[in-house]
Image: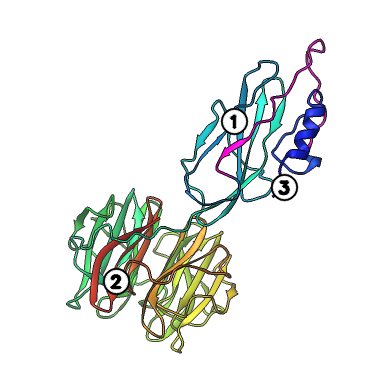
Amino acid sequence: MKTKNKLADILMILMVTVFVTSCSNDDNNISEPVTNPDPTEENKSPEIFNLIAVADGEVNVNVKPVFSWEKAIDPDGDSVTYDLYIDVKNPPEAIYSENLNTVSFEVTERLGISKDYYWCVMAKDKKGGNTPSAIHSFKTRDLRIPNAPITAKVPFSERSSHTSIEFNGKIWVIGGINDDNQRLHDVWNSEDGENWIEVTPSAQFSARSNHTSVVLDNKIWVIGGNNGQRLNDVWYSKDGKDWIEATPSAQFSARNSHTSVVFDNKIWVIGGNNGQRLNDVWYSKDGKDWIEATANAQFSGRQGHTSVEFDDKIWVIGGYDGNFPFLNDVWYSNDGKDWTKATKSAQFSGRFIHTSVVFADKLWVIGGEDDDDFQNDVWYSANGTEWYQVANDASFSERSTHISVVFDDKIWVIGGIDGSGYLNDVWALE
C-alpha cells in the first residue's frame, strides 16, 4: 500500500507555506500557501508522527476498534489537535472525529462487518499548520455466531410462522402456530432476549399464523395471515396490549405467507397466497386505505419469500412459486411498481420460509428450506447480486418458519421448526 512518505517529504520542505487538508496520497490535495498572520514569526507545522493501532493490513478487527497514534510534536510549542479519518475509500475522505486532544480514540458506533477500511490522522496546530499521517488499511471481523443460545427455552410456547419486530427498545414476538397446531394471538417482549414478558395472552385480533408485522408511525401493525381461513384485516397498537382494527378487509385479497415492509413512510404488502401465488404489490400510509402499485410485478408470483428495505429500495428474495427448485432470485424496486432483477440465481441454494434482515450495511439470508432439507446457513450481500457465506452449518439447528430481527446491534433468530419439531430458542448473532 502507498503511504504518505512522498507527501511528508514535501511538507518537510514546504511546511512554512503549505498545509494539507486531508490524509491523501494524491499530491493534488496540497492546498494553497497559508499566509501567516504574523509575518515576523514563521509558523512550523507539527512534526511527522506514526500510527500505532489499528495496524496496517490488520484483519479480523473488532467492529468497535480503538485507534491510537504517536503524539505529534509542534516545533513552536503550539498545542496540537487531531482529526481522525475512517472511510471505505482510499484515500479516506470522511472525518470520523475531529479536534481530538488525545492520541487515541475508541469507536462507539460499530463499523461494518467483514468490510475493508482505510484510516489516517491529521495533526493540526492553532495557526493553520497541518501534518498528515500515513494511510493504513484494515478489515473488520466476520459475523460472530455463538456456540450456545441466549436461552434454549423461553416462557412462550414453541412456535413457527410467528412475527417479530423491534419496537420501543424491545424485541416483540406476535402470534404464530404451536406444536399442537393451535394458532396464537399472544404478544411478548424482551429487553435482552433472555427475559420475556407476556404483554397480552389474547390480542383483539384473531389467532393467526403466516401474517406480517411492521412498525410505522410509532405503532406495531399486524397484517393478514391465516386463522383457519386467509385474512386481509389490518390491526395496530401503540403498546402491544390494546389493538385497534384499521380495516377488517383491505383492498388487497385475503392472503397468507406474504411479506410486508416499511418503505417511503408507507406499509407495503407483497405477494403471498390467496389460493394462488401472487406477485401484486400494495401500499398504504395509514393501514386503512390501500393502493395497488402493480398487479403483476416482474418477479413470479410467490409465497414464503422475504422482503426488506435496503439502500433506499424494496427487496424481494427467494420463495416458492409453485415450481421446483425453490427460488434464489433477488429483485429490487425504487417505487414498488417497476422491479429490477439483481440476480436470477444467488450463490445460496433456492429456498423459502427463510428470513432476511438488514444489518451492518448488508442484506442477510438465514436458514429456511431448500429442495433437500432445513438449512442453518448464513449469507450476506452488499449489493444483492454477489452473496458470501458466513456459515454453512451454524450453531443453531437447521430450521424454517423462524423469525429474525435486528436489535441491540445483533441479529436475533427465534423459534421455528427443525427436524425434531417446534422451537422456542433464542440466538444472538453479532
Assign a secondary structure to mark 3.
loop
Is residue 337 left or right of 259 when viewed as pictured? right
**Circle 1 residues within 10 Å: few <14, some 14–19, many ≥20:** some
Locate residue 349, reporting x and y percent.
47, 79
Q: Which mark is residue 416?
A: 2
Q: Residue at x 55, y 43 (%)?
A: 54
| Residue 183 seen in the figure | yes
> Of 105 and 109, which appears nearest the observer?
105
The quadrant of the image that shows the C terminus is bottom left
Q: How many marks?
A: 3
Q: Which mark is residue 2?
A: 3
The three-letter code of the residue at mark 1 reads Glu
Mark 1–mark 3 Cα distance, whole angstroms, equals 20 Å
Assign a secondary structure to mark 1.
loop
**Residue 145 lies in the magenta stretch:** no
Residue 180, image quadrant: bottom left
> Of 110 and 114, which appears nearest the observer?
114
Is residue 175 left or right of 359 when viewed as pictured? left
Q: Which mark is residue 214?
A: none
For disc 1, the marked residue is: 70
Locate residue 160, reporting x and y percent.
28, 72
